[in-house]
Amino acid sequence: MSRLRPDNGSKGRAGEDAAAAYLEHAGYRIVRRNLRLPGGEVDLLCRDGQTIVFVEVKARTSARFGRALSAVDARKRATLRRLAADYVQIVAPNAGVRFDVVAVDGDRITLHRNAF
């Protein structure tokens, strides 16, 4: 059986690819993609100067289920904060940390710096 539409995994990868390219163009350095840690995953781990940036990427092909940014709910933010605290404590205890969200709504990419 062939699929007429891409599955969520390939849509998510396409959104992450677009977000990574956008961030690199904006001067970020991509350190890791899909960083798996106990308790969750970080879509993009970046450096913006001396700051470690944990980036959540959300992609929507339509507004049917809301805008991409609205999918980064309180639970997701809490998970990312916990993952970041664990990561930074081990890897770079004195580094500055920031949380950005890249929202991909169709063909529009929006960077939300210091989103939470």
Image: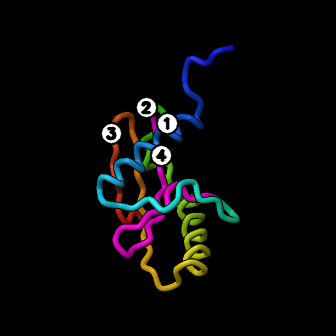
Magenta range: 41-62
Relative to residue 24, is residue 46 depicted above or below? Answer: below
Q: Secondary structure at mark 2?
A: loop
Asked if marks 1 and 2 touch (Cβ < 8 Å), the reply is: yes
Mark in front: 2 vs 4: 4
Relative to residue 20, is residue 55 depicted above or below? Answer: below
Image quadrant occupied by the C terminus: bottom left
Chief secondary structure of the magenta span?
strand
**Amino acid residing under circle 3:** Arg
Which is nearer the eye, 52 or 76?
A: 52
Identify the residue shown where x is 35% and y is 62%: 113
Where residue 33 sits in the image (x, y, percent)? 53, 55
Identify the residue shown where x is 30% and y is 52%: 25
**Amino acid residing under circle 1:** Phe
Give the numbered dot on residue 62: 2
Q: How much space separates mark 2 and mark 3, taking CA atoms?
A: 11 Å
Say whether disc 2 or disc 3 marks the residue closer to the N-terminus: 2
**Amino acid residing under circle 2:** Ser
Query: Is-magenta flag for residue 59?
Result: yes
Identify the residue shown where x is 60% and y is 68%: 83
Which is nearer the eye, 53 or 30?
A: 30
Where residue 109 sits in the image (x, y, percent)? 34, 44
Residue 22 placement, left or right of 59: left
Give the numbered dot on residue 23: none
Say which residue label 4 marks.
16
Quadrant of res 88: bottom right
**Amino acid residing under circle 4:** Glu
